[in-house]
Every structure is written in C-alpha cells, then in structure tokens.
Image (cartoon, coloured by chain):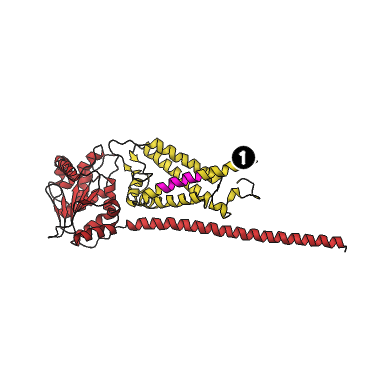
Chain colours: A yellow, B red
Amino acid sequence: MAASPTSPWARTAIPWVTTVARLVLGGVLIAAGALKIGNPADSVVAVKAYQLLPESIAVAVGYALPILEIVVGVLLVVGLLTRVAAVIAGLLMFAFVFGIAWAWAKGLRIDCGCFGGGGQLGAGQEPTYLLDILRDFGLVLLGAWTARFPPGRFALDGALGLGGDTHHDGDEGDD
Amino acid sequence: MGKGERTKTQTQSAREKIKAQQAAQRTRDKRRKTVTYVTAGAVAVAAVGLGWWYAASISRSEEATGALAPITVQPDGTAVMAQSGVTKPVVDIYEDFQCPACKELERVSGQTFKNLAAEGKAKVVFHPITIFSQEPTKSNSVRAANAARCVADGKQWLAFHDLLFKNQPSETVEGFKPDQLLQWGTDAGVTAPGFEQCVTSNKNAEAHLAYSKKISDEQKLTHTPTVKLNGKEIDNPVLFSPSQLRKEISEAAK
C-alpha cells in the first residue's frame, strides 16, 4: 500500500467520509432488516426463491438474516466494533450481489426480496436485477472503505478508545 | 560519588519509574479495551442469536396429535376436513400447489389446521386453485390440481395434497409430470382403477380452471395462500405463526 504521509486535508476528510459511509450502509441495513423481521415466513420464501441454498439452510438464513442486518446496521450507525461490522456488512452485500447475479444468470424472474417481499414476480412485473446489483455493489464499496478507515467521526469506538487506525500517536503504520 | 552524579542517577531512576508506570498504564488500557471489545461483540452475537431463536420459535410447527378428522372430497374439487357435526368456525384455505408461499404455509401451519379440525375446533376447507397465468407454472399447477381431483377418498386426498406441496417443483421448470403424479398417488395409498387414466388425460383441467376463476372472483382473491376465518382474511403474521393461528381460530370457535 501507499505510504502514509497523508496531507492534513485528507486527515480531516477521511474520518468524515467514513462517518457518511457508516450511516448510509448502516441505515440501509437497518431499513432492510426492519422491513423483513415482522414476517419470517416471507423472508424464508424470498431466500428459497433464489434456488441457491438447500432447503434447511435456506430456512435458517431466512430466519437469521433480518436480525443480523439490524444488529450489524446498528453497530455501524453508532460506530461500535466498526471494522468487524463493516467487514460483515461488506460480505453480506457481496453475497447479495452474487445471489442476484445468480438469479439473473439462471433466468429466474424474482423480486430480490431485499426490503421485504420477494419471491416470484407477477405477470406484469419486470425484475430490476441491474439496479439491485449496482446498489449492493456500491454498498460493498462503502463497507470496504469503512473497514479500511475505521471508525470515523461520531463513533463509539473513538469515544471508548477502540479506534484502531485513527488512534492518534504511536500507530502511524498501515496495516 | 559527586553531587551531580547522584542527581543524574536519581533522574534516571525517576525516569525509569515513570516509564514503568506508563507501561503499566498501557497494559491496563489494553486490557480495558479488550474487555470492552469482547463485551460489545458478545452482546451483538447474543442479539443476533436471540432474534434468530425468536423468529424460529414463532414459526415452530405443531406436532401431530392423533388421528385426522374425517375428510370429504366435494364435487367442486374442494375437500372438507371436520369432525361430524362441526360446522363452524369455517377456515377456508385457498392455495395453489405450485405456489412457494403456500408450500411454506403448509410447512409451518399445515399441522395446526389438521390438529384444530381433529379437536373439533374448526371446519377446514381446502380450495386448490390456480393463480398463475404464465408458463410453466400455470400448467404445473393445473396438472397437480387435476390429479388431486382424481382422488376420491378423503384420507388419500390429504396425503396426496401433502406430497404435492412437499415435492413442489421450481417455478422455472416443467414439473408435476404425469408419472410423478402417479407415483405420489401410489405413495398416498391411491388404488382406485381410474386414477391413472384420470391423471394422464388431465380431464378435470377445465372444471378446475372454471372453479378457480369463479371462486377467485367471488372471494376477491389476489394472492395465494389466502386463508379466511368465517369469511375474513387472516393476516400473514398470524397465519405463519402456529400458536397465534391456533389462538385466533380457537377464539372464533367459542
């Protein structure tokens, strides 16, 4: 990686960018989880519609996914365990990109079920795979940024001194 | 030993002392951080686990409690499951053999319907319909529904119904093929001589589609599964939670 004689400007800007990335990624995750958590059956059907996972695993994922999204989203928003949360969020989004691409490649006609709903589309509806993939890929990048430059401003990690990279003196070195 | 030298030694030892103190402080800080980190991580993992457990527990299916209530296959293709003399509350289940959400309903709440009927707490009516308008799902659904109409015995009908959902094909391929349907019929205990011809000729297809259209219009069905309790639709969160479903139907039985 590049050495770190970062300009003062970058030193100020980077934590703020991280904060924005955290809020966007965390906010999306919380919304996605909250819209699904009230109805585990829908969530299970949405996961099964991808025809990607074996029956029993699809059921477990359907039950676990909404709460996982909410917890990781909250961690990102408050900036606690920022790096770990960002890595999990990034991997989740990457898995979604893969799943949607899979459905597309297989010629399935499904709703991604990203924000509730999901399953087979009706007669008049068209899948929105490209849009879903671009959105989720953008969120992968936000996750990668946050994992690289945690925890940003207004983060509990900072307040608790768990700050990793942005810890002031001493650990100037890159990872 | 000169005076100056002593001062130097003192300064040195003081410096070392401070250094040692700083090192100890760093160790304490590090330990505190680790504890905070691990605690936060444990709480997060516990929250996920708890939510997962909760989702799984509200969807937990009932166990089979005993013999089924008598089942009667009607001329219109529906099947009534009720103890004799039980006429209410009426639970109407509108479902499509090809619809994944219906399969999920059967997986989660199917046993609850059976138990409630067996306990004499409800009259359950199964209405197989075809909600799909596109291929291959439409033909899959019609073939399955036709085959169900070929089963005259109630007990065999319900066993066949369960097998159809259990073996539901993907929505992207041709499924519910005649030889599969015949096999599941045998598995369900169907021995009637006309069954094979009835399945392969698809002879009930038109009657099924006509009933499907008629009941969908009458009941204003927009999606499957739709389950109505005394004519009023049961909301999904209740429908897919066996304990809440039991409570709602039992209360209507009073």
- Kindly identify the residue that appears in the image at 17 percent across and 41 percent down: B213
Q: What residue is disc 1 on?
A: A9
Provide residue A105's location: percent of width, then percent of height.
38, 36
Of A159 and A123, nearer the camera is: A159
Q: Quadrant of residue B123?
A: bottom left
A6 lies above or below B55: above
Q: Which sits in the foreground, A39 or A56?
A: A39
Between residues B192 and B54, which one lies in front from this camera angle? B54
* Residue B189 visible to an observer of this rendering: no
Quadrant of the image containing the C terminus of chain B: bottom left
Identity, as a three-letter code, of the amino acid under mark 1: Trp
Query: For this view, does B111 lie left or right of residue B5?
Result: left
User: For residue A127, what is the image quadrant?
Assistant: top left
Let me know if residue A30 is in the magenta part: yes
Judge whether B69 appears above or below A51 on screen: below
Instruction: Please state the horizontal and vertical placement of residue A170, each as a whole percent of the image.
Output: 66, 50
User: Is disc 1 placed on a helix, strand or loop?
Assistant: helix
Image position, residue B176 (x, y; %): 24, 43
Q: Which quadrant of the rendered structure holds the N terminus of chain B?
A: bottom right
Q: Is residue A110 visible?
A: yes
Give the extent of the magenta segment: A21-31
